[in-house]
Image: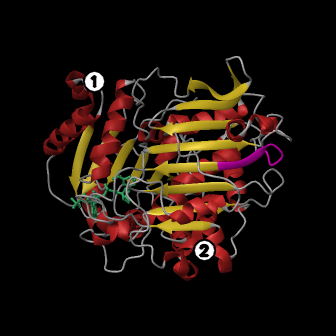
Amino acid sequence: MAAPDPCLLVILGASGDLTSRKLLPALYEQHAAGNLHPRTSVLGVSRRAKSDEAWRDELAEAVRSRVANFDPALWATLAPRIRYQAGDAARPDGWEEISARIRRESLADECGNLLFFLAVAPELYDPIVAAIGDSGLVPRERRACLGDPAAPWRRVIVEKPFGVDEPSARALNQRLASVFEESDIYRIDHYLGKEPVQGLLALRFANGIFEPLWNERFVDHVQITAAESLGVEDRVAFYDQTGAIRDMIQSHLLQVLAFVAMEPPSVFAADRIRSERRNILESIQPPDVERLEEVAALGQYAAAEGSPGYAETEGVAAGSTTETFAAMKVHFDNWRWAGTPFYLRSGKRLAAKRTEVVVQFKAPPTNLFRTLGQDAEARVAEADRLIIEIAPQSRVRMRFAGRAPGATFSLKTLEMSADFGGRGGGAEPEAYGPLILDAMRGDQSLFKDREEVEAAWAAVEPLLGAASQDLRRGIAGNYAPGSWGPESSKLLLGRDGRSWHDDG
Ligand SMILES: NC(=O)c1ccc[n+]([C@@H]2O[C@H](COP(=O)([O-])OP(=O)(O)OC[C@H]3O[C@@H](n4cnc5c(N)ncnc54)[C@H](OP(=O)(O)O)[C@@H]3O)[C@@H](O)[C@H]2O)c1
């Protein structure tokens, strides 16, 4: 794997939560692991005035509270490379000072690489990208630097949410393309930086035993769950405009689904992996908008002792139909998966905090053990289940039926389990770190391309638009906190003779 190039990482939105909670802890971890190029530095930009020192002090506190084994001496070797510039990045005149500082910090010799990170509210992406374009920092014609055969690069990392629907994603793609080459645009989804998600690729493609079974002939169905036990907490304003489909399903869950369902790439290379992910998302069958209740279920959590329901939460619009729970059934129009449904669900205030993929293989053609009674039938029904846990555990489990010891013949459920992350229980690094390094080395494998983002929006579009009104009618308080969501979610699988894997 190529080493990351040196660059100036320009974080736009430096005073924000993402920067202090995720980005700087991630950079510190990568610095501690010796992965950052020694000439890489950081310039934070946001509107409020503060000195380099004041920002470093803020960050030192934030990093200390978030990383395991914070080492002040190590921080002291990174801190001098962290600087701050006040400025309004959404206004072209704001860029006079910002670009002067960037040139001073990094481009004095015209050879510096620049990595912009849009860590601001999504409505600012468009004006900020336009202003970067106007600043002249991203020349269309790259000049090779004197004595350096490689031209300096200009790249941009764009945070999610990438648009609020397909048209807005397309408009943002056009704006980005007016300033950056597609090969320089990194649409980040930090889920793809999680080791167990990448472990899915290894599990599928580094072993011979799964791939022959990984299709509609042997897989009954797949479930992908991202459940949270907390409510909306302090993200009410954002969440009420967003909901579970935009926040989780369109982005994270469809990305995980793409890794589970995609065809093997011919080589392990960014463009091949991205093209397979895009193909699988584009082969999602559009649902019949007249019968959405057969493919989706939406909900809002009710009140519980001591905590208000979503609808009564301060800041939530009166009569809001924003979903805090969403489940959907996905069918693919392709040879591998025709007829095998993928069920996705995500929600807040659910029974557990858990992200997992469950691959349920088909039962044996006939159940030899049916004469042993209902218990044996139940054992067979829950066997042949591969459970890939992404969080909070990071492991893979295979559940199967075996004989229970004893004088009479009966069945019991057995499991094989392996630590997926392989860190032996050690803390996983912040997922942003490896992704930022990938952007520094020019590897787009784990970033979404233009068509992939648009295909993911197209897949959920019917559940967001006017056609979803019936699904949203009466959702206020339709599931109890601590449950696994509304009845309609159980029915989604129940109608198909299946049930959610709720027992962990
Ligand atoms: N927080 C997370 O964990 C998380 C996770 C996934 C995705 N995201 C996404 O990441 C982005 C940032 O999220 P966040 O939670 O960090 O938001 P945030 O806390 O609101 O921070 C954004 C920062 O941007 C700065 N800002 C606003 N207008 C600006 C302008 N015109 N020019 C320069 N800076 C400006 C603000 O600082 P000043 O007032 O000083 O300008 C503010 O502190 C959002 O798109 C969010 O959806 C966040």
Q: Residue at x 59, y 33 (%)?
A: 199
Q: Look at the numbered disc 1 and give the secondary structure of its residue.
A: loop
Residue drawn where x is 42% and y is 45% of the image: 353
Q: Is residue 460 left or right of residue 440?
A: right
Image coordinates for residue 136, horizontal then vertical, percent: 41, 61
**In the image, residue 433 above or below residue 303:** above
Q: Which corner quadrant of the image does residue 233 belong to?
A: bottom left
Q: Residue furthest right?
A: 365
Coloration mode: secondary structure
View extreme (front): residue = 407
Q: Quadrant of ligand 1?
A: bottom left
Query: How dense is the environment of label 2, judged by Cα within 10 Å: few (below 14), some, or many (20 and up)?
Result: some
Helix, strand or loop status at disc 2: helix
Give the magenta part as a residue range: 215-222
Mark 1 Cα-neighbour bin, 10 Å: few <14, some 14–19, many ≥20: few
For the image, the number of numbered tags is 2
Residue that mark 1 sits on:
69
Q: Is residue 173 visible?
A: no
Give coordinates of residue 68: x percent, y percent: 30, 27
Amino acid at pointer 2: Pro
- Alpha carbon distance from label 2 to label 1: 47 Å
The answer to if 218 sits in the magenta stretch is yes
Q: Quadrant of residue 112?
A: top left
Three-letter residue code for mark 1: Asn
Above or below, 29 relative to 504: above
Residue 37: in sight, yes or no? Answer: yes
Q: Is residue 447 above or below residue 495?
A: above
Disc 2 or 1, which lies upstream in sequence?
Answer: 1
Relative to residue 385, is residue 90 drawn left or right?
left
Q: Nearer the viewer, residue 343 or 453?
A: 343
Q: Which residue sits at x=63%, y=55%?
A: 343
